[in-house]
Amino acid sequence: MNQKTLKIIFLSYLSVVFIGAILLMLPFNHLGPLTFMDALFTSTSATCVTGLIVTSTSENFTFLGQFIILALIQIGGVGYMSIVTLFFLFMRKNLNIHEKTMAKESLNYSSNLDIQHFLKKVFLFILFIETIGSLILALRFYQDMPFLDALWQGIFHAVSAFNNAGFSLFTDSLMSYNNDYASLITISLLIILGGLGYLVLVELHYKFLQKKYMLSVHTKITLVGTLFLVIAGTLLFLAIEWDNEKIFTLMPLYQKILNSFFLSVNFRTAGFNSIDLSQLSDASLFCSTIFMMIGGGAGSTAGGIKITTIAVLIIATIHTIKISNQEPHAFKRTITTEIINRSSAIILVASFITISATVILTETQHSNFMATLFEVISAFCTVGVSVGNSDILSLSQTFDSFGKSIIILLMLIGRMGIFAFGFLLIGKEKTKHIHYPTGRILL
């Protein structure tokens, strides 16, 4: 990991955010008054593929404004440096080592596969998946609105879903479609595919073409972890909210299962909602913060500390408790001490940041603690769900400029990555050829 490269990537994200905010401030891109803070918040939320909104996307932005938000989502999901790299590739320019390094860091890519070949595959996958998703959703929405409106809605929601952004052009997100299999399942599949990570998608493609191709441990852990979390979340939310009169009581069984599944998918990665989240019990809200903190796959459009991080710590913990004479391993592959230490650091720093931000916002914004914790983790893990401001916007809309600035910072840190952001601030320690005696510490 190169600190100079990370600085370039971080500054590029900041540049995109500020350019996006300035464009949204132009009078022909928004309707009614729009403060620069709200424009900056919207631009950050889109670029960091979060989905928290302080102004209605459908009611307060023109078609051009919505298009800018969609472009920011796509840039944020793929990565600014990756798009620049692809431009160089289309111009038939061979990448130098520095450019390849920036592309790898932007995608959190560590495989030995050629980055140029990998990027071309990634963009083909993005184009294919988003096109198919757009067509399916457009055909569904065409039943409720004119064709051109349905096409735009389909494109916007497909791109937003695959990039795990959670922005919607419906004022109630997807609550009007909470009994519709076609739209909710399509959007859920797009979110899951985007949350797996580009490396996983490429390896699955190789596996499909060559049956003997060996999937990496990263891909296996991500696939198993995703399947487990989706099923566990569905059953958990179904059990907790089964008798909730404000949500599930009047729904038939199929609708309860459908919306529990949609909750499970969105709580980890995206900000869509098919029910009023403010009516969820505190038990569901607390459990959802755990799912949000875990997030999706590394190198994906999803946020959180990532499935592989939590999996590594669980494996290492079980190994430690068992006092095994073997090194921690998964799928017959050893997990190095460096990876375990890095995972521990990520969780510790993430916990510190979210707790500190929650306390600060609760005290300065005089907001409910559980709702604030939910909002903070949603922003930090770039999920985008919110209990709301008692209307259609997020809880962040009730915050003052200081509170919104805290949420903006959380989204930027979450999108950059905890380890990358920490390394960017602290830097790498110089190599020292000193070995201290082992100290005895009681635990």
Image (spheres, rainbow, N blue to C red):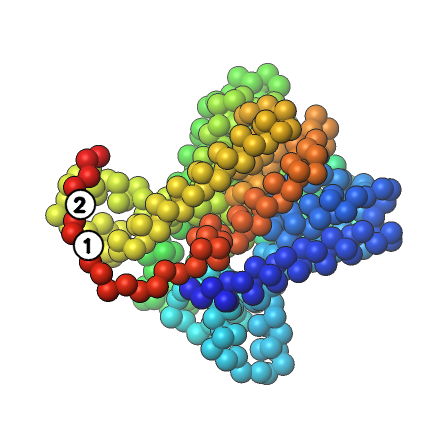
Mark 1, residue position: 436
Q: Position of residue 432 (x, y in %)?
A: 28, 63
Whether residue 43 is visible:
yes
Q: Is residue 186 visible?
A: no
Q: In the structure shown, which secondary structural element does the residue marked by tag 1 occupy? A: loop
**Residue drawn 53% across and 48% down?**
414
Q: Is residue 440 left or right of residue 129?
A: left
Residue 233: % across, % down: 46, 34
Q: Within 10 angstroms of label 2, few (less than 14), some, or many (20 or more) residues?
A: few
Q: Do tag 1 and tag 2 residues touch (Cβ < 8 Å)?
A: yes
Of 336 and 278, which appears nearest the observer? Answer: 336
The amino acid type of the residue labelled 1 equals: Tyr
Work out whether residue 427 or residue 185 is closer to the camera in this orientation and state it: 427
Of residues 425 and 25, the one drawn nearer to the viewer in this rendering: 425
Q: Quadrant of the N terminus?
A: bottom left
The residue located at (87%, 53%) in the rendering is 28
Residue ranking furthest to the left:
325
Q: Is disc 2 placed on a helix, strand or loop?
A: loop
- Looking at the rendered structure, which numbered label has been put on residue 175? none
Which residue does the image show at 44% across and 38% down from the upper left?
351
Q: Count numbered badges in the picture.
A: 2
> What's the residue type where badge 2 is placed?
Gly
In front: 283, or 305?
Answer: 305
Which disc is residue 439 wearing? 2
- Quadrant into which the C terminus falls: top left
Quadrant of the rendered structure where residue 92 is?
A: bottom right
Residue 13, given in percent of the width and then of the height, sits at: 61, 58
User: Quadrant of residue 11 in the image?
Assistant: bottom right
When the figure is inspected, residue 176 is found, relative to residue 241, above or below; the finding is below
